[in-house]
Each structure stands twice: as structure tokens, then as C-alpha cells.
Amino acid sequence: MHWIDPDHLPEINGTVDQFLVNKHGEADGFLLTDGEEVHVPPHLSAPLLRDVRPGSQVKVRGVRPRGVRMVAAVAIDTPKGRILDEGPDARKDDAAFEKAEHGPMSAQGIVKRSRTEGRDPRGRARRRPHHQAAAA
């Protein structure tokens, strides 16, 4: 949501509990220790994993989609600085991302809860079940 000024959005504060990953192994969100789910677009995976760890204190500015218990982040203030959603085109200059192989992944573990009750950040039903997995 690169066209939204994050400084005019509501702010939530919290401690990161664990990352949420998509089927390609990219971090596309995280859970806070209070259970709040924060969604980030996959093009922010690299800076998110670089600057945030479980236990990190964050301030998230974002929007809350209708009918979904989550926040779609526009900006995340971390101890190392601000991660700002400038849109997916901003990633074109990320040489490491372009060189990385992206493909389906698999994971094993215990499902704590279904992500956004089976809905995407816009409140639409997901095509396939999409469950959270912990990432390092």
C-alpha cells in the first residue's frame, strides 16, 4: 500500500512472537505475543527477516480489513528502523531476491490456528487452506 501515508494510520505496539510464511517460504506476516496477526506483503519478506526477530518490539501502522482479525501493515517501526511498503516494484533492485530460487515449500508442525480464519487481507476466502508456520 505504497500510496498510503502510514503516519496517518492507527498504530499498534507489540512484541513479535513468530513469523508467518507463505507456500514459497517468504515471510508474509507475524503474530504478536497478544495474538494479533499482522500481514505484510511478500515483497517485504527480506527486510522483515533482516530487521525483526521473535521478541522484537515493533510499532505497526496499517489498516484493518473488514471481517478479518488482522492488520495489513503499511509501515513497521523496528529497533533497526522503519520497514515501509513501497510496493512490489521497489523489490526489482533487490539482487539477492532476484537470484534466489522461489518454489513451493513444505513444513511440519502443530497448527496453532488458521490464518485470518481462512481469509486473505482483503477479507476474501482463500482458495486453499493456508496455515501458519514458524520461520527462523
Image (tube, grey):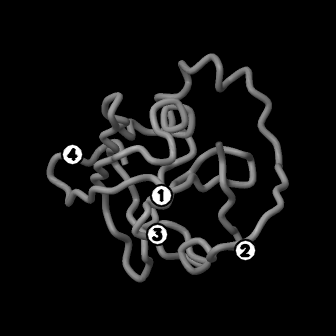
Residue where numbered disc 4 is placed: 5
Whichever of callouts 4 and 1 sits on the residue coming sooner in the sequence is 4
Relative to residue 83, is residue 51 drawn left or right?
A: right
The residue carrying pointer 3 sits among few (fewer than 14), some (14 to 19) or many (20 or more) residues within 10 Å by Cα, namely few
Residue where numbered disc 1 is placed: 39
Three-letter residue code for mark 4: Asp
Residues at circles 1 and 2 in contact by the CB criterion of under 8 Å: no
Residue drawn at x 52%, y 54% as measured from the top left: 29
Numbered label attached to residue 129: 2
The residue carrying pointer 2 sits among few (fewer than 14), some (14 to 19) or many (20 or more) residues within 10 Å by Cα, namely few
Above or below for 15 versus 123: above
Relative to residue 96, is residue 43 drawn left or right?
A: left
Above or below for 62 versus 124: above
* Mark 1 or 3, closer to the camera: 1
Residue drawn at x 27%, y 56% as measured from the top left: 13
* Mark 4 or 1, closer to the camera: 1
Disc 3, SS: loop
| Quarter of the image with the C terminus in it | top right
* Mark 3 or 2, closer to the camera: 2
Q: Nearer the viewer, residue 109 or 1?
A: 109
Q: CA distance from mark 4 to mark 1?
A: 17 Å
Three-letter residue code for mark 2: Pro
Whichever of callouts 1 and 2 sits on the residue coming sooner in the sequence is 1
Residue where numbered disc 3 is placed: 122
Q: Quadrant of residue 86?
A: top left
Whichever of callouts 3 and 2 sits on the residue coming sooner in the sequence is 3
